Amino acid sequence: MSKNLRNICIIAHVDHGKTTLVDHLLKQAGTFQAHEATADRMMDSDSQERERGITISAKNASFRLGEVKVNVVDTPGHADFGGEVERIMDMVDGAILLVDAVEGPLPQTRFVLQKAIEKNLKIVLCINKVDRPEAIGSTMVAECVDKAFDLFVELGASNEQCDFPIIYACARKGWCTAHADQIPALLEGGGADRSLRPLFDAILDIPAPGGDVNADMQLLVSNIAYSDYLGNLALGRLVAGRVKKGQELIRHGLSEGKPIIQKFQVSRLLSYEGMKQIEVDELTSGDVGLIAGCEVLEIGDTLASVGAPALKRIQVEEPTMRMIFSINTTPNSGREGKPLQSRDLRQRLLNEIRNNVALRLEDTDQADQYYLLGRGELQFGILIEKMRREGSEFMVGRPNVLMRVENGVKHEPYEKMILDIPETCSGEVTKMYQQRKGVLVSYEAAPVAGAEEQRVRLVFEIPTRGILGTNSMFKTATRGSGLISSEPIGYKPHAGTIFHRATGSLIADRTGQTTEYALASIQERGVLFIGEGVEVYEGMIIGECAKDNDLNVNAIKPKKLTNMRTTGSDGITQLYGIKQMSLEKCIEWIDDDEWIEVTPKSIRLRKKILAGNLRSVRKIDKA
């Protein structure tokens, strides 16, 4: 056991302040020199993380509190990336559970807390955002603590785990306190020391990692990094023993489901200092570090000294939905990027699932199409955007949930969905989700001090199918002021047919360049997705039809030239407006008989069958 070492993670629901708190922990611990420039949300290094303002993958850093080194892991808060939380739980001995003082424990809070309790971690409850206007002068902070305690009890926490320390914090301003009665003084700028010292003290009270330094070396691979100079790097915590540079180790892995053993020699050892990786000569039991030298690695492998047994592989929740990936078969293939061949597409998806334990890959009956199994639309959208930025061209279909057959009855995944919305929108939102087989199980007022309008919190039990594709409609119904979150609650009997959308598609019936004259007449039939001067092909979707059937249209028809003048406004056309379809909107919108064509420059929608005379335009035929 190393007394001068602590391994912790920060866990919470999305947007409750984890990454901001890690920023201030690193700064106040003296990790950076006075002349070093630092950015907000330093741990969100990926371009998509900074653009979206969310954490996508778990990341490691460290700081020092006197003689004690603290390894800290920042985790994602969105439910789609729950696999990132599950795989790092074996690396830590304690967790800081962050809860918003106003919103309280939400679905992802419950999910990550359950995993932490199962791993018997020492948990510190941190009530964040106590400076929110709604929380100041109200009983919300005390109620938040009570709800968190109830959640601990409900999830079966032990007496020791329920006796958790409580910290009240304002992460964005970098201060906290262990005493609720000091919050008013700290908010006014006076009172006790405005720093994170109480949280640092709580971290030091977390048990040091155990393990026998003199035993055989064992490390469970929790993540894989890559270096241009060192190749693949295995990231994990040494469960026991020690490892030195040049030592011979054994990799215990799997190949096609069968155990394999592979020998390799350690070429480099790396450890974290702040946010940097530094080379070290030795790692000992309890250390979190990286080992270079083994070219073939998968998350869940065990690296051990010769003769030592393998550790139990990382287990994560099973996927609940799947999305089909295909090579690009449109007439435009190869014009805007690198079209992936079937073997390239398969290899790219295999590389992704090696680095993400929450994903699975399955073959289809088509040689150039593959099913990717995962947790949610956002998880798929992140991967699609990543592949697009790599310069690849490919196509994806609509996400579909994974069904099960139990005792001859078809079952589907259900979710508990929590909506925080203005009371004036509750009727429209309730109707929308009840039409999608949702059952309203709770309706309660959510009084917010100083708020202009009364808000309510609705709880639905709804099939996962009923949630897919509703994000845009929910934002429209709540005028952008609603909050939505959900958690899986298991499988229940199939709820019956749920129509994905009530409208059809406007489909180009020939190849060419769109004209304003043609679009002006088409826009009377629905909403356009593209403007004039855009190259289209037969089968490409150019808009949403107002009726429930598809409509094939001529979008390239030119205005015939004539020397006859009829009125003063002759020849003047005007388009009402184009609905811009982002990748996320496309994933929500498409139906089962449609593809999204993804290229580095464009996102297009198309029918799976391009030829108009080979497909039906009636929705009843598709159902």
Image (cartoon, grey):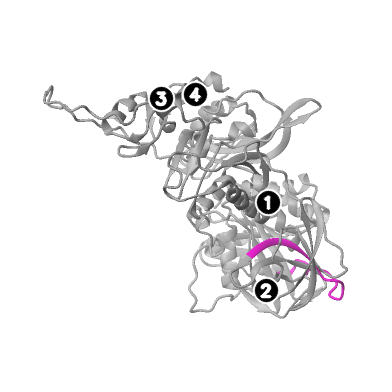
Residue that numbered label 2 is attached to? 271
At label 1, counting other C-alpha atoms closer than 10 Å, the crowd grade (few under 14, some 14-19, many 20 or more) is: many
Q: Nearer the viewer, residue 319 or 367?
A: 367
CA–CA distance in space, label 4 to label 1:
42 Å
User: Going from the N terminus, do you reach mark 1 or mark 3 first?
Assistant: 1
User: Going from the N terminus, do you reach mark 4 or mark 3 first?
Assistant: 3
User: Going from the N terminus, do you reach mark 2 or mark 4 first?
Assistant: 2
State which mark lies toward you, 2 or 3: 3
State which mark lies toward you, 2 or 4: 4
- Give the structural element (helix, strand or loop) at label 2: strand
- Give the structural element (helix, strand or loop) at label 4: helix
Q: Residue at x 62, y 54 (%)?
A: 76
Residue 205, magenta (yes or no): yes
Residue that numbered label 1 is attached to? 83
Residue 280 appears at what percent x and percent y?
Answer: 69, 79
Residue that numbered label 3 is attached to? 552
Q: Tell whether 401 sits left or right of 504.
A: right
